[in-house]
Amino acid sequence: MSVRRSSEKTYIFKYDVSGGDKATGTVTLGSLPSNFVITQAWIHVLTTFTSATDAATIALGYTGATDAFDAAIAISNASNPWDAGAPRTSDVAADGAVGNFVTTAAGDDVLATVAVETLTAGKLLLVIKGYVAF
């Protein structure tokens, strides 16, 4: 029997419109290691997102599941998901329940996908916790 120690890791990815990532399309925020087991994820909007008519949508995910952390939703949605405020849980592995864990493939990229309109402002942090499976 083999025992290997694996510690929990936290990755923080930033999406900042003021940094030039404004146009519609997909932006790579970084990558996760191979065989990374996502146990929790949450989103913290630091600066409210805006677009010409607030019709822009934002989705957060990773390679092969581009809306895994947050499905595309308009920044004008009544629930205000893209307004600055307290961190909120994501759509995947949000509650830390074992049955909701997700394992990445070989170095999956973390992605932000913007559609409908170009963003004019906004900044968020996507925080992902988990461990590398061996």
Image: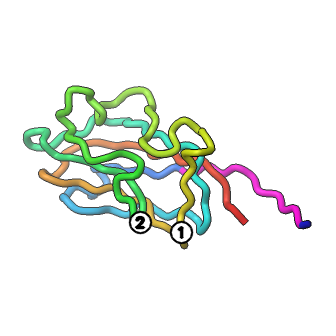
Q: Is residue 20 above or below residue 99?
A: below
Q: Nearer the viewer, residue 1 or 74?
A: 1
Nearer the N terminus, badge 1 or badge 2? 2
- Please tell me whether residue 123 belongs to the stretch shown in magenta: no
Query: Residue 84's quadrant in the figure?
Result: top left
Q: Amino acid at mark 2?
A: Thr
Residue 63: mark in rendering? 2
Query: What residue is rendered at 48% in x and 67% in y?
Result: 108
Which residue was labeled with disc 1? 105
Query: What residue is rendered at 54% in x and 45% in y?
Result: 100
Q: Are marks 1 and 2 in contact (CB under 8 Å)?
A: yes
Q: Amino acid at mark 1?
A: Ala
Range shown magenta: 2-11
- Judged by its main secondary structure, the magenta piece is loop
Q: Is residue 28 left or right of residue 34?
A: left
How far apart, in angstroms, are the residues tagged by discs 1 and 2?
9 Å
